[in-house]
Amino acid sequence: MWASIRDRIENEMWNDYSKMESFQSQDTSSSNKDNNNFQWSTSMSRFMQKCLVEQATNRMKVDKSFKRSAFVAAACAVSEKFKVSCFNCNVENHLRTLKTKYAAIKKLKGMSGVGWDNNAKMITKDEDAFNEYIVAHPKDEPYINKSIEMYEELVVIYGDDQVTRSFSRTVADPVVDIDITSVNEETSETSHTPRSVEDHSTSSEQVKRGRKRKRYLDSKIDLLANKIGDLASAISKSRNHDISMELYVEVMKCKGYDKSKLVKAFDYLLANEIQARSFLARDDTLRQMWLEDFLG
């Protein structure tokens, strides 16, 4: 029953999301075209990655991604330093490109027959094996026997440790189920109590079915939560995209507060459009008064 209810809700949320996505694509098609044409130079990319590492240090990273204010902050920093018009969507798009690079590096590090020089941040492979491999995989050539630029920054941005722990838990569950059942059945057989063996076997099967059902329901709930998050993000972007950059700049101009408190105020205003627009309409004195009331 719960599975059918979740499936129905999931389908309804997906339909709503699809409608919103269609509306947004029609409403912002020309803007997206301009944003997608943003050109990242090597120096811009390096600077942006360092900005995001700083944002992660300031606890602007949640799980495997960043808060939206972190993307806005990085975009503002790039715009100011390089005198360009960089937006948070440009930062997010560039991160997708870098993620492809990081995934390739991670795959290569996990292959047999390769080494890792931690000091040089370099994947190593002997010359003959390297030449043979590159013939079949030319795209991997920049990442082998060469120092990988910004490797430590990529690890911070993409959270390699978190991904590994999560993946280990996912893989370990069914293995534990099988091992526990096997051990318990062997123990029961050596006890020479047939009735106990039957009861224990039934109990083990019920536990296994319960665990499988729980993992199935958890996966459905995670999928539903992700789609709800996508919908909320789409709505937020459609409403706040036009003021987010201006709002961040104006909040950060306020004096007398450290950066973490100003970011807290920015996050609140970004989530409350009416108050955000009211804040932008005020002069400097009234903005300081609002911050005093909000931050106490």
Image: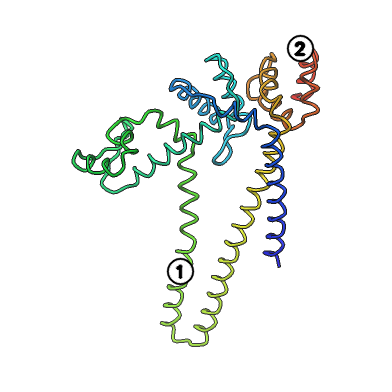
Q: Are marks 1 and 2 in contact (CB under 8 Å)?
A: no
Q: What residue type is labelled 2?
A: Asp
Between 128 and 61, the one lying in front of the other is 128
Going by the numbered disc 1, the residue's amino acid type is: Ile
Residue behind mark 2 = 284
- At 63% from the left and 48% from the top, the residue drawn is 226
* Front residue of this view, candidates 92 and 289: 92
Residue name at image x 46 percent, y 22 percent: 41
Q: Horizontal and vertical percent for residue 164? A: 45, 47
Q: Residue 103 in the image: state x and y as whole percent.
A: 42, 41
The one of 179 and 193 positioned closer to us in this rendering: 179
Q: Is residue 170 above or below residue 284?
A: below
Residue 110: x, y in percent? 35, 46
Query: Along the polypeptide, which appears first: circle 1 or circle 2?
Result: 1
- Checking the image for residue 178, the label placed there is 1
Apparent side of residue 68 relative to residue 116 in the rendered image (left or right): right
Q: Between label 1 and label 2, give the one nearer the viewer.
A: 2
Helix, strand or loop at disc 2?
helix
Residue sitting at x 45%, y 69%: 178
Number of residues whose C-alpha sits closer than 10 Å to that of mark 2, classed few (under 14), some (14–19) or many (20 or more): some
